[in-house]
Image (tube, helix red, strand yellow):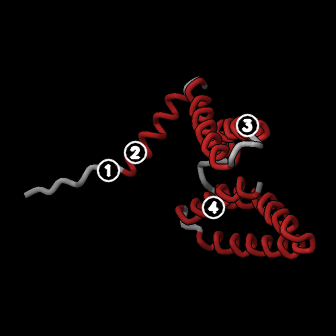
Amino acid sequence: MGALIEPLIAICGMVMITQGRTKYLFWFVVMYGFSLILGFSIGVQWGAIGVAAGYTIAHYVMIVPSLWLSFKDTPVSITLFLKALSKPIFFGVIVAVLLLILANGTVSWPSGWRVGLSLVIAAISYLGLWMIHPRGRERLFDNVSSLLSAFFKPAPSVSR
């Protein structure tokens, strides 16, 4: 569950860098590192599960300060940021529930088949949710076209 929050914290670091607030970023990273060390130190008493729990708790504790620090004095509010993430997160939760149901129904299958089927079901259901959502298809196509244009930029022309 900590892996769900970690990308948000990474985005916060990128926002601080792009805003030229590396001093804030430095102190945030110090606090973040301290929270991870504390979480690991407490969790190690319960073995691997405790360390994972400490890692997860440290991330959840740090999410609010990281969002506040990164969006402070910017036109982006925490509410606007979370609103932009709400649909992808909601669709991801639906896909996760579908995959849990699939996992329970395919326990006796070979793991390779289970993984392959899970990937196919996840991709089809996630894209399908975007396709049936109002304006979801438009948003999906915009995101895909932006992604493709980032990877396949036309070669600069050379004037002679």
Marks 2 & 1, CB-CB < 8 Å contact: no
Label placed on residue 148:
2
Is residue 72 visible in the rendered image? The answer is: no
| Coordinates of residue 71 in the picture (x, y in percent) | 65, 55
Label placed on residue 102:
3
Give the mark nearest the N terminus, 4 or 2. Answer: 4
Dot 1 surroundings within 10 Å: few (below 14), some, or many (20 or more)? few
Select label 2 or label 3 by which is in front.
3
In 3D space, how far apart are the residues under numbered discs 2 and 1 (Cα atoms)? 8 Å
At a point 46% along the width and 36% down the height, the residue shown is 142
In 3D space, how far apart are the residues under numbered discs 1 and 4 (Cα atoms)? 26 Å
Label placed on residue 153:
1
Given the image, on which type of amino acid does mark 1 rest? Answer: Lys
In 3D space, how far apart are the residues under numbered discs 4 and 2 (Cα atoms)? 23 Å
Given the image, on which type of amino acid does mark 2 rest? Answer: Leu
Foreground pick, 11 / 4: 4
For disc 4, the marked residue is 10
| Coordinates of residue 91 in the picture (x, y in percent) | 67, 36
In 3D space, how far apart are the residues under numbered discs 1 and 3 (Cα atoms)? 39 Å
Given the image, on which type of amino acid does mark 4 rest? Answer: Ala
Give the mark nearest the N terminus, 1 or 4. Answer: 4
Given the image, on which type of amino acid does mark 3 rest? Answer: Leu
At a point 52% along the width and 62% down the height, the residue shown is 18
